[in-house]
Image (tube, rainbow, N blue to C red):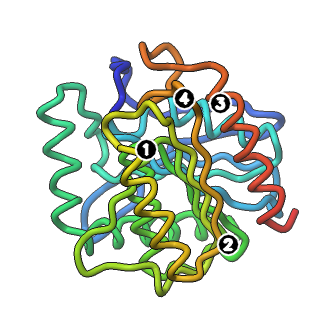
């Protein structure tokens, strides 16, 4: 998980992105408040649902959201931990992610709640792709297994294990996995296992590895950041969006 500790918590934000203005969005799921970030260059823009890593929704995800808005996509960066919960200590990150790994139904409900919120903001959730980083990548695959009616699911150095009792039989969209082959947190054995699962389930997928790239290879400023893998994977993701979504 992410090496770089972001000391700035997500506050109310307004950021210009290619004519679009991004804003903090407070919303409710099962009576609890969450704080996401929404940016859209137009009412007709395809939607990208962005799921954060284990330190919560931070400046990093906002930067990525604005990069996507610059390319013509609406983005809702959701919050899986709760408004104001942006853990910086390792034990706290493990606690918050661990709670959701143990309660998959809650994880799914939070992602559905975020999609409902994006829809209320005017986003077209029928022309949408979800993607995430690390823990967020694991959540994206949970969303794929849930049968969510999205066109695609993509992960950057995300968790790849399938929980006992789950499978990809309900998956509707195609899947893109971008993984560092030097990742010791998420091994190549797990990568291969997922490839076999997706093939057996008949899920359209593409899985790419980047040589020498470690876990969190896309995190700007992190000590495992690898510029080549970051740029190549981002280019691959942009091609995936262009091929998957109706523009």
- In the rendered image, which quarter is residue 47 located in? bottom right
Does the CB distance between marks 2 and 1 fall below 8 Å? no
Indicate the quadrant where residue 20 lies.
top right
Report, in whole angstroms, how far the alpha carbon at label 3 lies from the one at label 2: 28 Å
Residue wearing tag 2: 151
Find out whether the residues at labels 1 and 3 contact each other: C-beta distance under 8 Å.
no
Mark 1 or mark 3, whichever is nearer to me: 1
Foreground disc of the pair 3, 2: 2
Q: Do labels 3 and 2 touch, CB within 8 Å?
A: no
Give x and y (percent) for residue 224.
44, 19
Label drawn at residue 167:
none
Left-right relation of 113 to 46: left
Residue density around tag 2, few if under 14, some if 14–19, many if 20 or more, within 10 Å: many
Location of mark 4 (residue): 218
Image coordinates for residue 11, horizontal then vertical, percent: 42, 31
Mark 4 or mark 1: whose residue is earlier in sequence: 1
Crowding around mark 4 (Cα neighbors within 10 Å: few <14, some 14 to 19, many 20+) is: many
């Amino acid at each position: 998980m992410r090496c770089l500790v972001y000391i700035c918590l997500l506050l109310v934000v307004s950021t210009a992105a290619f004519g679009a203005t991004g804003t903090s969005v407070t919303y409710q799921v099962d009576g609890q408040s969450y704080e996401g970030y929404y940016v859209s260059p137009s009412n007709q823009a395809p939607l990208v649902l962005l799921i954060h890593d284990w330190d919560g929704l931070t400046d990093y995800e906002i930067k990525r959201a604005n990069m996507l808005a610059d390319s013509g996509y609406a983005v809702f960066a959701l919050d899986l931990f709760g408004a104001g919960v942006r853990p910086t200590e390792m034990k706290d990150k493990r606690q918050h992610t661990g709670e959701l790994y143990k309660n998959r139904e809650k994880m799914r409900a939070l992602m559905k709640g975020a999609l409902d919120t994006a829809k209320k903001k005017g986003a077209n959730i029928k022309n949408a792709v979800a993607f995430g980083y690390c823990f967020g990548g694991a959540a994206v695959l949970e969303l794929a297994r849930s049968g969510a009616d999205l066109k695609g699911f993509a992960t950057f150095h995300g968790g790849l294990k399938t929980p006992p009792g789950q499978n990809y039989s309900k998956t509707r969209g195609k899947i893109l996995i971008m993984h560092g082959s030097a990742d010791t947190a998420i091994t190549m054995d797990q990568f291969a296992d997922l490839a076999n699962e997706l093939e057996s389930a008949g899920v359209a997928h593409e899985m790419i590895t980047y040589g020498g790239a470690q876990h969190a290879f896309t995190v700007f400023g992190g000590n495992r950041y690898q510029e080549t893998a970051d740029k190549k994977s981002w280019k691959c993701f942009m091609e995936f969006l262009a091929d998957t979504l109706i523009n």
